[in-house]
Amino acid sequence: MTITARSAWVTNTSRPDQPDAALLLREYVSEMVVRYHRRPTLPGEVDAALAELPSDDLAAPSGLLLLAHHGTDLAGCAGLRWQPGWAELTRVFIRSEHRGAGGGAALLAAVEERARRAGADRIRLDTRHDLVEARALYARHGYAEIPAYSRGPYAEHWFEKQLTFASERAK
């Protein structure tokens, strides 16, 4: 369990198939569908999207999923997929009622620490053009736009952050 600088935020790992994780991942996908299509979801659309881009690899040994709690409320999630020497950030989501309270920063700090502990030297991610708040969050926290490294169906912007380790920060 990680308690962030804003003590109201706590993160812990979960398997994607656990009830709280599955609920948040479903809410994440639902919001992505609504924002992409600019309309309410259609029957079966979220299930189809979950099947198209599953999250089952966000568990050992291929990755991890962090759940964030704001106080006692289940408030968000973020995942990492392990790559050789680096980690890919995915599924960053904060429930609307907890936005603006530091949850994105708390999740980024927690996934960066987990990636460092796993030996990753950088984190990469891709995101969509319409997710302007996410792109601003990443930029605020030291993620720089890079050339495309992936070809996902919704990948329109790519970011990377070099991770520093405690020994490097002490210099």
Image: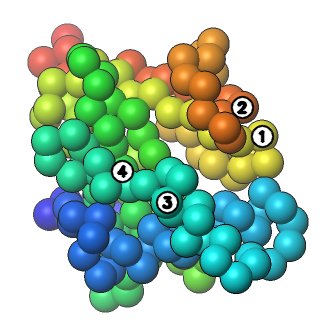
Q: Is residue 3 visible?
A: no
User: CA gap, disc 4 to disc 1?
Assistant: 20 Å
Q: Earlier in the sequence, mark 4 or mark 3?
A: 3
> What's the residue at 63%, 48% (across, down)?
134
In-image side of 2 versus 161 (left or right):
left
User: CA gap, disc 4 to disc 3?
Assistant: 17 Å
Q: Earlier in the sequence, mark 4 or mark 2?
A: 4
Question: Which residue position holds label 2?
Answer: 156
> What's the residue at 45%, 27% (across, down)?
124
Q: Quadrant of the C terminus?
A: top left
The amino acid beneath tag 1 is His
Q: Residues within 10 Å of mark 1 (few under 14, many from 20)?
A: few
Q: Is residue 80 visible?
A: yes
Whole-percent x, y for residue 131 in the image: 72, 49
Q: Nearer the viewer, residue 135 or 140?
A: 135
Q: Earlier in the sequence, mark 3 or mark 1?
A: 3
Please determine whether, in this image, residue 44 is positioned above or below residue 72: above
Per the rendering, the mark at residue 51 is: 3
Q: Residues within 10 Å of mark 4 (few under 14, many from 20)?
A: many
Per the rendering, the mark at residue 79 is: 4
Q: For numbered disc 4, what is the local secondary structure?
A: strand
Q: Earlier in the sequence, mark 4 or mark 1?
A: 4
Q: Quadrant of the N terminus?
A: bottom left
The amino acid beneath tag 3 is Ala
User: CA gap, disc 1 to disc 2?
Assistant: 6 Å
